[in-house]
Image (cartoon, grey):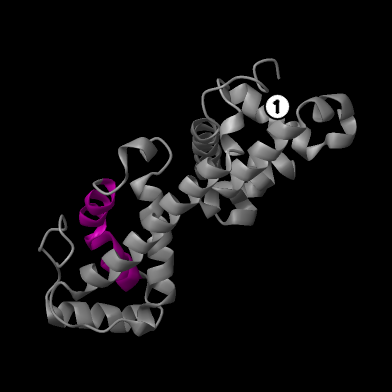
Amino acid sequence: MSHDGIDKTTLQDETLSDLVARAVQGDSVAVTVLLTESYDRMRRFLAARIPRSMQALIDADDVLQDAHVDAYRNLHRFEVRGPDSFDRWLGTIALRRLRNQIQRYRAAKRGGGAAAIGGATDDSIVTMLDIMASPEKTPSRRAARGEALEAVAAAIELLPEAYRQAVQLVYLDGLGVEDAAARMGRTPSAVRNLCHKAKRKLLAVLGSRTRYLSDS
């Protein structure tokens, strides 16, 4: 493959052509084979390109999952041009996704909003989400932490789509995990895991100062 860091082991042309044709027709098994066969290579490729300063914020698996969604939606545009053509095509999509993530975090850092909170715990993040969901119940706390709430809202926008949806449904809309799982088409365990990862990413994004959340 032309991208440095991706192994050359790929599907044969005839197998690849058949899988792509079946995948475009909606064959879920073919889609699964196409995407999982290259998963480890793509993950290593992305992980090697995440800046060290952002390794706590950006997960190669998350980026790759988003890239898989893009690839599935655009499979009809892919053309087989050699045994490594699918890797090259998927690698381009994944790299674009990664660059977009990096740019978003750098833009947020320049803006200064998300870095205004920190030294927080999972509990303080949940407290802020609760205040965001029910501001009328806690007007004084909301007023005292208005800037913090804005920063949390900005940080949520930086989360991968599935994380944002889980946070919205569970913490902001107040759905139970099982109801949120049904809405998302996932298992309750998967939604709990998304919420856990979302909180960890929010903690990482929100920096190292404890001005707003230390006594939440």
In the rendered view, would you say 145 is above or below 87?
above
Please give left or right for residue 67 compared with residue 129 in the image: left
* Kind of residue sitting beneath label 1: Thr
Is residue 12 a member of the stretch shown in magenta? Answer: no
Outermost residue toward the top in this view: 215
Please give left or right for residue 179 compared with residue 139 in the image: left
Q: Residues within 10 Å of mark 1 (few under 14, many from 20)?
A: some
Quarter-of-image position of residue 195: top right
Residue in the image at 74% along x and 45% along y: 173
Residue in the image at 28% along x and 79% along y: 20
Is residue 45 a member of the stretch shown in magenta? Answer: yes
Image coordinates of residue 174 in percent, x first then y, are 74, 41
Q: How many marks?
A: 1
Magenta residues, dominant SS class: helix
Q: Secondary structure at mark 1?
A: helix
Residue closer to the observer: 57 or 9: 57
| Magenta region, residue range | 29-47
Looking at the figure, which quarter contains the N terminus? bottom left
Image coordinates of residue 43 in percent, x first then y, are 27, 51
Residue in the image at 61% along x and 28% along y: 117
In the rendered view, would you say 205 is above or below 209?
below
Q: Which residue is mark 1?
A: 127
Residue in the image at 65% along x and 20% along y: 211
Q: Does the image show residue 212?
A: yes
Outermost residue toward the front in this view: 110
Image coordinates of residue 216 in percent, x first then y, are 71, 20
